[in-house]
Image: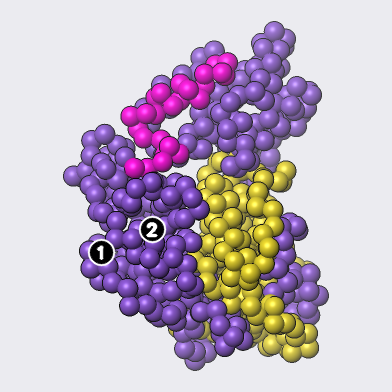
Chain colours: A purple, B yellow
Amino acid sequence: MNDEPTDEIVRNAARSDDAISRWDVTGGEDDLLQAILAGDAEGAGGSAPARPRRRFLGLPLSPLRAGLALACVAGLVVVAFALTSGGAGTGSTSFADAAVRVAEANPRYLVTEPGWSVTRVDEFEADSGEIEFGDGDGHGLQITWYPARYYGSYYRDRGEVAETDFSFPELGASRTVSYSDTDFATMLEPDGAVFVEIRGDRLSETAYKAVLGSLEQVDVDAWLDAMPESVVKPDERADAVDEIVADMPIPPGVNLEALKSDAGALERYQLVAETTSVVACGWLDQWAAAYKGGDAAAEAEATAALQSSHQWAALKEIQHQGGYSAVVWEIADWVKNDQREYLLGTGVSSGNPDGRVYGYGPRYATALGCDSEHKHVIEESGAK
Amino acid sequence: MNAAETVGLTPANGGEELDRASGFEALFRANSRAILGYGLRRCAREEDAADVLAEVMLVAWRRWIDVPKDETARLWLYGVARNVVANRSRTETRQLRVADRLRGQISAQSSEDPFERRDASEAVRAALTLLSDQDREVLLLSAWEDLGPTEIASVLDLTPVAVRSRLHRARTRLREQLDVEPGPALDLPSDSERADQKGRL
């Protein structure tokens, strides 16, 4: 249980897992389990009369509303859009196809107010994503895009929030609601496959209107050019890989060229993880082969190289952005501490729907996603 | 006798199905209350959580091949639960017959053990509705399901960086709405954070 004070406040507003675990609902759970196993639940089994749809978004904070239970609080389903390379259409030639496809599907608004820039990009996908702009002084603006098919439900949900009479004719048809006197949100009508929602962060009415008034629709190149450093642009990728590995010893035989020319990753975190994996996996593979072959010198070389990962600048750079760095360092320390059995251990997965039994491993390769990971059928018994 | 056997699945009539059934039963028993809790906390009528659990487990049964066969299975189930709850909110809700008994039991338990919603709780719940959908879900997964940023990233198919950013923003906005003093804002990764489903660690 984390001890973040805000989480504690939220936690106290609902039943705890501990309390729920004491409920006597085992009979109903058993019935459900058996019904599923017996196939009785297929076809969703006779629905009772439907109840009206409930609203779940955008209730204004008022004593009246505060007395209401929160309906099913769910968000938009983030639909992963499989970006593929090739055939970028009419877009720029200086960016990856994947990035261009996102840009082409997007209304591509940029804040042109002086001092404002893109500070963050999330879920950079064609039909969902978010860009955050900031002025460096605590004020922000988020532009979120969603699949157009959800426009209707969002529009109805926002209908519960106090509507303003703001008008932004340059943005087309729009509706602005006010969550507070420094928290406004504007929905634009769908444009192609997506619709856009804009929300200010600590912007007064005047400031919000000014920032929205400065929004400009730009072309693909200008929009992608405005992306922050965390989005690695393809023409920068080779240099970025070189920079990431600058203080890493490269294992013999490891080639980074494919990594440099791959147009897949867009975020720097991903690129650092991808690049570091190639290097760390190379050393781990050498370590494993040397151990098995009794080559003490090669084993010592790999052990020292992996230990140096504690100083690799790229891993330090991303260590607070996710758990990748910690795992590389943990594995490096296991190598140093001779935890060979564990690192080289394999796993078995049985009970798979195809009836096969699979073997996985070695453990270090599975943990880091090394190419040397093996996954193979070790028992065909019962297979189709 | 386990549930798979009581419904007539035996090695004699299909070892493959028995493996699937045994695996599913283990998954169900290990995660039923967690998913029930997910639904209970998010639905206005607590008995609706029975249908949420039923729909989530039906998806897991039908898509057994896609369900992770390790400790990340619960994250996968949370991801399905999120979609199920979202779909129920967008569309006409339905009650599954297979969840009838569970629905009744939840209703009874809910009456016997009412959750006392103090004024403060109602204010928190109302303030939560003012967050954006994704910011809110990130915060709820942290506070209600006690997931770390990397686990939340896995459930929502976001990057851990995005989760931290949203978590920070959601907490800040909620505190502002509730007019409470800020707490520590730094979200450092916990030791337990591990790889997400994209191979990122």
Instruction: Give coordinates of residue A10: x percent, y percent.
Output: 67, 68
Mark pair 2, 1: CA separation: 13 Å
Q: Chain of mark 1?
A: A
Q: Badge 1: few (under 14), some or many (20 or more) residues near its Cα, within 10 Å? A: some
- For badge 2, the amino acid type reads Ile
Query: In the figure, A246 relative to A83: above or below?
Result: above
Residue stretch in magenta: A226-250
Task: Decide which of A143, B32 is in the foreground and name it.
Answer: A143
Left or right side of B198 for B112: right
Query: Mark 2 sits on what residue?
Result: A143
Query: Is residue A248 magenta-colored?
Result: yes
Residue B85's x, y, as percent?
53, 73
Percent position of residue A154, x then y: 40, 73
Circle 1: residue type: Leu
Q: Magenta stretch: residue B119 in it?
A: no
Image quarter where the N terminus of chain A lies is bottom right
